Amino acid sequence: MADMLVRLYALPDPGPAIARAASLGITIRRPEPSEREATIAWVAATFTEGWAAECRIAFDTQPPSCLVALRERTLVGFACHDCTRRNFFGPAGVADAARGKGIGAALTLAALSAMHASGYAYAIIGGVGPSAFYAKVAGAVPIEGSTPGIYGEPSKSVSGPPHGSQR
């Protein structure tokens, strides 16, 4: 899977997507430090241990380089940045039951906007699975020659599939 590039200086305003999520009772925000373990456990149970490991890295920064989507106090999605590498967006995901409602778009735009606010002009989305989603939501374009990128074959001492195959 190819990597994609996002021009953060030309990113759509996240406000309408966040407002749409709010109209569904969804709050998009940075998690509190006290929510660290529950968030990481939810990511592991809902997605993969690999994504949970990256989410753990997001909590090692202040503020956390992660956003969460909550319906009341229940996690329904997350989006991280600057975890795999600096200037990389992801991992990000929305629970199956909450998909198709714009929550992923709100999380994506909020996280990419946070990256822009921290000084980045561009963001890389590594090993993209849903390329049409990122093209539509954030104007992402494929980076030619980026397969397999940093998510190529892991070293023999690391077990499991390449990270990029999970996106």
Image: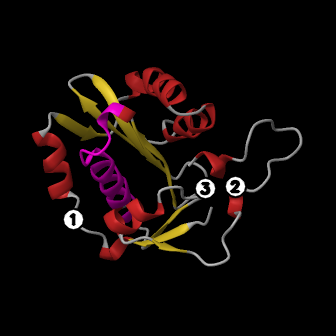
**Which sits earlier in the primary sequence, circle 2 or circle 1?**
1
User: Pointer 2: what residue?
Assistant: 151
Which label is found at residue 13? 1
User: Where are the magenta residues, as a range?
Assistant: 97-116
Choose between 112 and 159: the one closer to the eye.
159
- Mark closer to the observer (3, 2): 2
User: Pointer 3: what residue?
Assistant: 85
Hey, which residue is sitting farthest right in the picture?
156
Hey, which residue is sitting farthest left in the picture?
23
Q: Could you tell whether 45 is left or right of 135 in the image? A: right
Q: Specify whether residue 103 is in view.
A: yes
Q: Residue 82 in the image: x percent, y percent?
A: 52, 53
Q: CA distance from mark 2 to mark 1?
A: 30 Å
Q: Residue 7 in the image: x percent, y percent?
A: 40, 75
The figure's colour scheme reads secondary structure
> CB atoms at circles 3 and 2 under 8 Å apart?
no
Whether residue 4 appears in magenta in the rendering, the answer is: no
Tell me the quadrant of the picture where the N terminus can be found: bottom right
**Which sits earlier in the primary sequence, circle 1 or circle 3?**
1
- Tag 3: residue type? Arg
Q: CA distance from mark 1 to mark 3?
A: 25 Å
Image: 22 above or below 16? above
How many residues crowd mark 3 within 10 Å: few (<14), some (14–19), many (20+)? few
The dominant secondary structure in magenta is: helix
Q: Could you tell whether 83 is left or right of 70 in the image? A: right
